[in-house]
Image: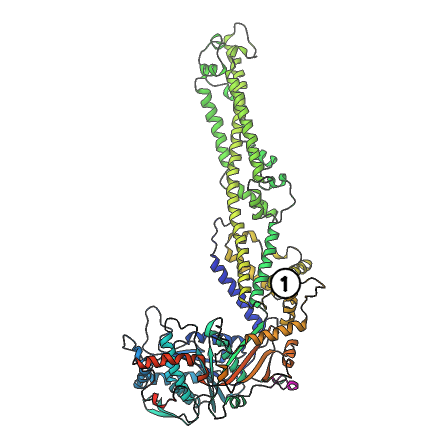
Amino acid sequence: MVTGMEFNSNNTLKRDLEKYAAQYAIEQERQGSLGDGRSSIHYPALFLFVGDLVAPAVSAVQEINRLKWDNGDGVVYVQIGTEDQEAGSGETRTGGSSDDGQVTRHRLPLFAGQTERPSKTRRKDVHRSFHESDQALFDLNRTLRRVSNRIAEYGRLYSSFDRIYVTVVTRADDPLNVLLPELTKLTEIILSQAFKSVQTDLHVLVSEMEQVDSFGYASAAGLAFLRELDYMQSLDYTFSGNLLVTEDGISIPVTHHASPLYDLVYLLSDKNERGTGVPGGWIENAEIICRICLLKNRKQDANHSGSVSSTGANTYNNTSFKNNIRTTSDQHGYASAGFAEIRRPNKPIALAVLYHMYRYLLARMRQEPDWSIKDKLAFFGLDAASLERKVEGLLPSEDLVSGMSGIMTHNVSFSDLKPLSLREAERALFGQGAEAYFRDNVVRLVEERVRERSSTGSLRRQAEQSRAEHPEVGYFQWAAWSDGEPGSVREALLGLIRDKSMQLESARVLLEQRQQERVEDQSFKRALFRDKQNVRNLIDCMLERVYVPKVDLLRLENELHLLRIYDTEMEELHQFSRHVTAALEALERTLRETAAQSIAAADEYIGQNVMEYYGKVTEELIIDLEAKRGRDVWFEDRYMGDMNQLATEGDDRLLKRLMEVCHSLLLAAEPLQLPFEEELLQRANVTIAYGDKDVLTRDDLFRRLYHTLEDQAVVRVRVFDYTQEHRYEEKYFFGDHHSAFMDYAAHAEETSRIYKLGVVYEERSSGVEKLNLMGGFHLEDLMVYRNGKVYYDSYTENGYELHPAGLAEKLSPIR
């Protein structure tokens, strides 16, 4: 039995719960019991992240693709920066790359040997340093060739190896994007040796919300990049440079003929078109990046080609989209996007079900058996019969009177003893001998036997032994029965102590009275002229009148001593059991708080009534399970087992077992496998009384979902609407082809909409997503462009060189 308990901090438990909920959500997203089928990409894909500022986006994009793409484990990611992402504990690398399989991080040693980065010429120096460092270029060539070989290893995961899609991601204010032409063309030329076609898109992340401490320079550098981007995307843009390097150091020129550098350029901000901030900041655009890549490179299913011909909703056509966002003057148009998803709130569901299951188990543990106070006393071995057995045999079994009668006496005549009290007569006859004999032969023996019978923890051992026979009695009952409140075992024990104390006091008074009685008043037989016989008779009387009560007093004292020891142990037992039950109750609060926080983090509408609905679902599942497998199925060894014992081993152990049991017995049950629309409909109406006119119908629900998706899929870039003359939109739903809502969405507003609608079918029942594409705007239409002009001009006037040498003259004037 574990006597000490170490309970993890609340934060540790919440981290474990978040992992549990996230794992359930992943299972549901991938397949689980819902049958969700992930999409696959048709051609290989490479994500190239340029700059140190976008390093956090690598793991975000990778995780999304792993979760949502069936062949996501074959996608390769490259992050090129100037800071060492892998070095730690003082380790610093001067260059090279690190590779963990899918992700390659390459560091360009562009600031090696410099103690301070020159801020006024940072972008210019990055460009110059790169072109002056033969070693940096050679290392980059080697890294990209290794990446190309790695992609070839994943060939079996793709339907075709003829083409590769390259997605370049950078931040507008990252100085390394000054090398985008070099990095893009070198990547393309190396990949073109393995693929017939390389298609490259650029995603520019704009951070408007974070510009607090460095808003001036970041705005100026961002605008400098946007001007260069306009130049790179012009129809007559050309590029040439000795970028290919052989193992012998021979440089080979790379040329880009007159055409835009990128197939399409998407600009994504951490503010949406309405000017409000995006929760999660610019990193949330990872979902958009991944969804656009899937839209352009999705493997088509033979049965569900992704179109709904009856509504004219077609699959994505890249050429058509490019043509539609190009202006009449053939000026390149930029694109942006918005993304929204509505899905079953799997994390809150997992936590809500776990909480309700644990709450039920605690209620079971708190249930009081229908026992009388006598039964409860017997549980702890404190009933009358048990106490009688405990004190039985404390006193010596020999005849104390006959044993003490042989004690040596002083030569005192009976006539001298007659006027004395019994106490005085005892001292006259025995001195201290009688007391010493009683102490040595009776008192010490009794005390020794009491010590043997009151060893530390005897009450706890008795309770554990009784609990083995009555497993329904656990630490909640221990805590309640030992708290001293009316009706508790401890109250009864304290009553016994009071009664025994009163008996002891009465015995002491009686003994004192006996010892004060006079010898001549005693009613023992006297013999004439036989002094010694009278003394002997007095001794027998004295033993009977004084020492028999002393024995009774000794018995009462030690019975009381035993009871007080049990009371002390009862108090310790209460502290122990209350500590355990307090931890059990604290875990309940943690489960409730974590579930509530998870629900609060979900969309207000989508997360409604989670606790109420899944409280009912869990209750019904529990009733059904117990009807089939018995009421004590939870406490079988293969499930929760002895929860009282488990609780003493630490709340982390208890929580781990709890999560395992919830996962195996409840989360896989059929009521948790409803399609997301049906689940949401039932959950929305869970608090509505039968016949209430406010009940939500399926059509009402679909209408709300449709508008919620549209409202949340706001394009994530801020433009001046009155200057955007060539706005073009396409909107795509991602969802289950069996979904009634998908059918509704495909036909909604079909007579009035002025945008192209597409439907991407996936074998999913846990949610629906919407991607809104918008294009046709120019850089000067952007708020960030207009806001950045004042900073760009000011920094330029103050001696900042924001472009590579000789490039500023080639750029179009600021509009």
In the rendered image, the vertical position of residue 7 relative to residue 408, given as above or below? below
Q: Based on the displayed image, in which of its 4 quarters is residue 207 positioned?
A: bottom left
For disc 1, the marked residue is 613
Q: Which residues are magenta?
A: 304-315
Q: Based on the displayed image, in which of its 4 quarters is residue 29 positioned?
A: bottom right
Which image quarter is the C terminus in? bottom left
Count of all numbered marks drawn on residues in the image: 1
**313 within the magenta span:** yes
Question: Amino acid type of disc 1?
Answer: Tyr
Q: Which secondary structure lies at badge 1?
A: helix
The percent position of residue 349, horizontal first and vertical second, equals 58, 65
Q: For this view, does 49 lie left or right of residue 560?
A: left
Residue farthest toward the top in the current orientation of the protein: 529
The percent position of residue 765, horizontal first and vertical second, equals 62, 74
Q: For this view, does 447 lie left or right of residue 248?
A: right
Picture residue at 63% right of the left edge, 63% below the top: 613
Q: Is residue 96 visible?
A: yes
